[in-house]
Image (cartoon, rainbow, N blue to C red):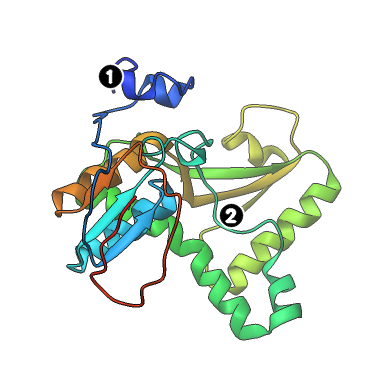
Amino acid sequence: MEHAPIRKPYAGLPSYYAATANRVTERPQLRGEERCDVAIVGAGFTGMSAALELAERGYSVIVVEGERVGWGASGRNGGQLVNGYSRQLSEVRKHYGAEAERQFGEIAREGSDIIRERVAKYGIECDLRDGNSIVGMHDAHMRFLRGRVEEWHRHGYTDVELLEGDAIRKVVNSDRYVGGYYDPRGGHMHSLNYVLGEAAAFEALGGRIFEQSRVTKVEDQRAIGTPFVG
């Protein structure tokens, strides 16, 4: 896929993602008074995901961003789709019970499903590739990874495959690793292009984004339709 060269709006963001960003649009600064059902602060992954979800449901939504869409961590991260958490789900069960563990398990896999659905629905060009591996360099790593695979299988995600010995070289051409696991529902994407694609989809549904519009104060008026002033 060919990428356009770096454009002015992201000249202050020196990264591969900024240099290969698609369809960069400079959006207006918020001036004066605007009204909406929901105002969202921040045009990163969380803000744009929430804004798009609300716009799909028919709400009038405004997003205000202090810099540009995807300017912070959302447009600079590694772009990996890794299902799971930094701790085993059994830790959730230990502290909060079996139902909490079940819910956390579902949420962990839901994120990558939402991304794939939006990429397909809105034609987001973000170089999405399926599958990833978590690898281990010694026995202690493998004990953790075996536990992770067993845990996913217990939650019904049997497509996660444990790779030991020579099997790891099916996915990683290196002798440094003793094993790992492969998750076909993991993946990798161009993180900035993904959030820019969400922004374009949001605007196509009537949503409005104001850039260079830093929020300095929030007042609780307890009324829908209250004027929003940046």
Q: Measuring from the top left, give residue 78's x and y in whole percent.
A: 53, 35
Q: Is residue 54 left or right of residue 177?
A: left
Disc number for residue 2? 1
Let me know if residue 147 appears in the view.
yes
Q: Position of residue 138 (x, y in %)?
A: 83, 42
Q: Residue furthest top?
A: 5
Is 168 on the left or on the right of 103, as rendered?
right
* Label 1 environment density (alpha carbons within 10 Å; few <14, some 14–19, many ≥20): few
- Can you say whether 207 is above or below 4 in the image? below
- Looking at marks 2 and 1 on the same chain, the residue that comes earlier in the sequence is marked by 1
Tell me if 22 is positioned left or right of 136 in this view.
left
Q: Amino acid at mark 1?
A: Glu
Mark 2 or 1: in front is 1
Rendering quarter of residue 71: top left
Name the residue rendered at 54%, 56% in the picture.
83
Element marked by disc 2 = strand
Residue beneath the point at 21% across and 69% down: 57
Q: Position of residue 159 (x, y in %)?
A: 51, 59
Mark 2: few/some/many CA within 10 Å (<14, 14-19, 20+): some
Say above or below: 106 vs 166.
below
Vertical position of residue 160 compared to residue 187: above or below = below
Kindly indicate the quadrant of the structure image that contains residue 194.
top left
Nearer to us in this view, 216 or 62: 216
Tell me whether the residue at label 2 lies in contact with that at label 1, contact meaning CB atoms closer than 8 angstroms.
no
Q: In the image, which disc is placed on residue 131?
A: none
Q: Is residue 22 left or right of residue 93?
A: left
Dividing the image into 4 quarters, which one contains the N terminus?
top left
**Dot label at residue 161:** 2
**Which percent across, then down, holds residue 109?**
49, 62
Quarter of the image for residue 65 reads top left
Identified at 28% across, 18% down, the residue is 4
